[in-house]
Image: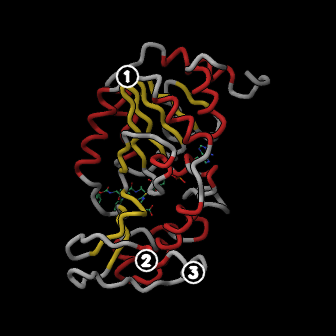
């Protein structure tokens, strides 16, 4: 263990709370990817939305109004996600999972970093930057042609036409005002209402229906441990709030659970 104030007390408490827990779930948000260099949404100055109004970019209306600007933002983010690496926190979460009989990652993130870090059972509530598709028939589109495009942040890219049906291509993410995939939110509900412990990592807990999942877990009697350097609307209700980043807390937790701390 390292010096006082480095989360030792929270880590010990988390290990106590997780003792005997067989079914675990992690609910992750943009803060989980922050230490990989992916901007979060709300962090002032660095968050995406400090520079853009989310309602100008992450909605069907925005795509209808200015398809090139919206499509360009997602191509930019797709490229960024490919250029960054999972950090120690992503890798440690895959290790934490091995301390449970069953463990699933329910993520709001669209960057694919959990899968690249070795997590196996992953539910992408809000889709994926890899899953471009057409508007008309949801025919898949491979964005590879954009890999080397010189694209400044905020640069516009006209959405191509689907090779199958001719309708415009859009990102395969869930925008505000769009329903989440029913299988994803249905499985997330099932997981959080039957788990023994839910780790809520790197989310501001303000976007629904994802933000409602921890309360479902609490109502069902699960232990809820929130890992976030800041407090959120969930913090007062969480069993434990661990004020640390994902890259600080998760390696510490993984080592403690493996008995190697
Ligand atoms: C729905 C994919 C039914 C796209 C995203 C009015 C009209 C329409 C809808 C609504 C409305 N009013 C309310 C709603 C519902 C709306 C909603 O919740 N709005 C909020 C703003 C109030 N939800 C929806 O629209 C959802 N659909 O409800 O359908 C419906 C249909 C029509 C009408 C009504 C209802 C769809 C929501 C999904 C939207 N898509 N992403 C894309 O990525 O571009 S949301 C996107 O924002 C993320 O996926 C994520 O979910 C959210 C951002 O939240 P976080 O991930 O938590 O990130 P954030 O930056 O906020 O926080 C980071 C946290 O990490 C912070 O706490 C920070 O302290 C911490 N942190 C920072 N660094 C670290 C760290 N933690 C750990 N380690 C670190 N290093």
Task: Report the side of 257 relative to 134 (left or right).
Answer: right
Between disc 2 and disc 3, the foreground one is: 3
Instruction: Say which element carries label 2.
Output: helix
- The residue where tag 1 is placed is 101
Instruction: Say which element carries label 1.
Output: loop
Q: Quadrant of ligand 1?
A: bottom left
Q: Considering only order in the chain, which callout, 3 or 1, is on the residue closer to the N terminus?
A: 1
Mark 2–mark 3 CB contact (< 8 Å): no
Q: Considering only order in the chain, which callout, 2 or 1, is on the residue closer to the N terminus?
A: 2
**Which label number is shown at residue 71?**
2
Between disc 1 and disc 2, the foreground one is: 1
Q: Considering only order in the chain, which callout, 3 or 2, is on the residue closer to the N terminus?
A: 2
Query: Where, by quadrant of the figure, is residue 197 drawn?
Result: top left
Looking at the picture, how far across and down is residue 178, in whole percent?
A: 30, 62
Looking at the picture, how far across and down is residue 220, in whole percent?
A: 31, 25
**Which label number is shown at residue 151?**
3
Asked if 130 appears above or below 76 in the picture, the reply is above
Looking at the picture, how far across and down is residue 122, in whole percent?
A: 38, 43
Query: Where, by quadrant of the figure, is residue 216 drawn?
Result: top left
**How far is disc 1 from disc 3 in space, using C-alphas?**
45 Å
């Amino acid at each position: 263990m390292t010096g006082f104030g480095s989360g030792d007390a929270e880590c010990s408490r988390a290990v106590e709370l997780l003792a005997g827990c067989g079914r675990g779930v992690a609910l992750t948000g943009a803060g989980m990817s922050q230490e990989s260099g992916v901007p979060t949404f709300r962090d002032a100055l660095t968050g995406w939305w400090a520079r853009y109004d989310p309602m100008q970019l992450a909605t069907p209306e925005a795509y209808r109004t200015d398809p090139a600007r919206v499509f360009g933002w997602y191509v930019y983010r797709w490229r960024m996600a490919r250029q960054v690496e999972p950090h120690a926190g992503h890798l440690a979460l895959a290790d934490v999972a091995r301390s449970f009989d069953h463990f699933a990652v329910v993520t709001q993130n669209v960057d694919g970093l959990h899968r690249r870090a070795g997590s196996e059972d992953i539910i992408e509530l809000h889709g994926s930057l890899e899953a471009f598709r057409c508007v008309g028939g949801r025919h898949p589109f491979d964005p590879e042609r954009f890999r080397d495009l010189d694209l400044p942040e905020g640069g516009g890219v006209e959405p191509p036409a689907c090779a199958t049906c001719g309708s415009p291509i859009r990102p395969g993410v869930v925008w505000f005002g769009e329903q989440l995939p029913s299988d994803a939110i249905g499985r997330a509900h099932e997981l959080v209402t039957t788990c023994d412990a839910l780790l809520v990592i790197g989310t501001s807990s303000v976007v629904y229906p994802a933000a409602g999942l921890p309360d479902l877990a609490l109502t069902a009697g699960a232990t809820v441990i929130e890992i976030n350097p800041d407090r959120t609307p969930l913090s007062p209700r969480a069993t434990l709030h661990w004020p640390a980043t994902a890259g600080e807390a998760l390696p510490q937790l993984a080592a403690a659970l493996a008995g190697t701390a």
